[in-house]
Amino acid sequence: GYAAVGVGETLSCNKCSGDVKATVAAGLLAITLFIIGGVVFILRKGEDDDTGPHAKVLKRGRTSSVIESATATFTSINKLIPKLKIIFSYFQIVGGLGFLFSLNFPPVYSTVVSFIGGFVSLDFISFMPVGCLEDASFYNSLLVYTLLPILITLFLAVWGRMVSRQKLKNAIFETFLAMTFIVLPSVSIKIFSTFACHDFDDGSSKLKVDHKIDCNADEHALYRIYAIAMIVIYPVGVPAMYLFLLWRKRHLLNGRQREKEKRMHEEKALELALKERKEKEEENQTLKALSFLYGTYEPKFWYFEVFETLRKLCLTGFLVFLRPGTAAQVLFSVIISFSTLLVYFNSRPFISKSTDNFNNAAQLQLYFTLLGALALKVNLDGENLQDKGYFDMILTSVQFVPALISVIVNFMKTLVSKHEHHCEIRGLNGSETQDELKEYFKKLIHSTKENAGWLELEWNDREFEKSSKAVLEVRNAEGFGTVNQVRVSAEFEVTFEDLKDYIMGNCVKGNSILEQRKLKVYTREHEISYQAMKLSSLLYVRDFVYECFFICHGDSSFYSLAKSIDSTLFDKQKSSHLWRVRAETKLSGYHVTKLGENLCEVSFLFDGNLKGVLSSNYLRKAIMKESMKTVVKNIQAFADNPEEWKEKPQKNQGVVNEAKANASARDVGGGLLRTTSS
């Protein structure tokens, strides 16, 4: 026998062979793994503590590299949801154009687009020769396409009723919304295909997608009634559900953005509106369940997912009824595409500018693809094979080039972007006295976004972020340029005195430290130190010669700050011989606040030049992020077992005391800070 395999223009009739069962089994295994991955994703998204039964499952799962890898993949995908939704929407539309327009697109274009379109619509069954196992008529596929999402919905509904934690309930409902988003276009086309019949000259009428089916038969009349019921559930019901869910929460979602725009700049209004929406989400936990519908849009465009859904339906299922197979049908789709393109270009509804640009590129792609379809329909693509080959190449390239350009442009902007702020606290000028340096450090370590312009960065490491709860911030000290100051803050369960000992250098600072020594000790509060460390992703080891100061305010607050100096005790030539690059630190240090008997808050600040290739904003942020992560991990390792760290010997520790060195300025090459007092 034979079975149909593929979708759209790649649909072919393949002879059934002995490997068919293995092919179908492999396909079913892939579907099963996809479902398991979806369940893991729901559990991860719904996890807010490590005590529930789902957390125990996840902890056991972490012993499996497969589950751990899948979890990491889904975490990364979650951050790309806005752009993934745009890609899915695009290929859901273009993947069905060949069928809708009764048009044979060029072979390369058809293969690429039909495959991707089938994948993003989760149409795995079409790629398996199931017809070799059982008669696969259109009616069977109609039932599978329409009933399977309903069965999954019932499963999710039962699961949602069984769990008690609101965050997991939200994750389950978001999964339901994501499923409707993915399956709606393909299911709608399948439903509307029930009404697409081809009339022959002999008076007979056959179903367009399956000529074995007689459109005049009583059986087909019953399936038409079934299809009408499915139209109510899918093409009508899903957008109506979206609108209902969003409309009743609109006062919580809009953030009063339009009102704010009348009183202030649009960017400031957006920032405040997003902050207000975030507060509403924290007050009303059920609101977060709808984030799949509104999360990527600005608060004032809370309804835009409904518009996007109707756009997709107009360019997929609804086209079945508009003079199918004619140039007029294609022209109508071009008009729809151009109209919606103008809406997106004028409104720019997404929160992120890069997402707006990416979406606009996709809208242009679709418009040019439809123009190409119109050219094919009216035979404007040339008559010889060479011209057709060129047309195929251009049409295929159009699917990827605009999006690729958008990605490259956004990446270049990230690479060369500058940090800008207009806040009062600026950088050091290099002539500060010792007292002025101390006061500046205290002011900066306690500064806020409002008076210093700090920009908070994401760690992009879910496990580290959750375990440490550390906050990472960067800024340009002068108000515009590459970031050159970084601050990290976190809380640790350790005593105040132990943490003081750690910071004052009585304990080894961690595995990243290759060498650490005190070159000269003047007093307990003033010393010269050397440190060499291996920073991840850097070719050379960076080393520093510091002048360090320690300031203690009672038994609840402690400051440690340092600044690079030129020193004959460990000069740059010696660093070069050891294949080390001398880095410059304008200012770095810790501030420790005692919060409880065994709880402290630590803030670490770094302002300096690491030298080498770290001149771009992108690379600076990346290395700062990794370096601050190392700082936090080292403090946490110390806090977990202070006594063990105290027992470790200092690496190459050497101390030159005040009596030996006579504390003269020439001993450190004139690099000591000027002081206002003797």
Image (cartoon, helix red, strand yellow):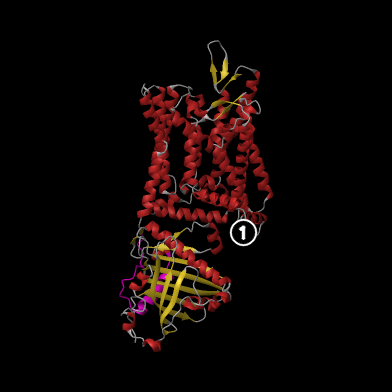
In this figure, what is the number of numbered marks? 1
659 w.r.t. 474: above or below: below
- Judged left or right of residue 231, residue 441 is left
- Spot the residue most to the front: 577
Q: Residue at x 34, y 77 (%)?
A: 567
- Judged left or right of residue 585, residue 122 is right
**Which type of secondary structure does the marked residue at label 1 adopt?**
loop
Can residue 671 be seen here? Answer: yes
State the image coordinates of residue 625 (x, y, percent, origin top left). 45, 61
State the image coordinates of residue 177 (x, y, percent, origin top left). 57, 43
State the image coordinates of residue 56 (x, y, percent, origin top left). 66, 56
Front one among 244 and 28: 28
- Spot the residue most to the bottom: 659
Q: Around disc 1, counting alpha carbons within 10 Å, would you say few (fewer than 14), some (14 to 19), or many (20 or more)?
A: few
User: Is residue 352 one of those drawn in magenta?
Assistant: no
Judging by the rendered image, the residue that carries numbered circle 1 is 49
- Judged left or right of residue 372, residue 312 is right
- Judged left or right of residue 135, residue 458 is left
Amino acid at pointer 1: Asp
461 w.r.t. 336: above or below: below
User: Is residue 436 one of those drawn in magenta?
Assistant: yes
Residue extent of the magenta highlight:
420-448
Front one among 601 and 565: 565
Q: Quadrant of residue 133?
A: top right
Q: Residue at x 49, y 56 (%)?
A: 460
79 w.r.t. 51: above or below: above
Quarter the C terminus occupies? bottom left
State the image coordinates of residue 149 (x, y, percent, origin top left). 62, 37
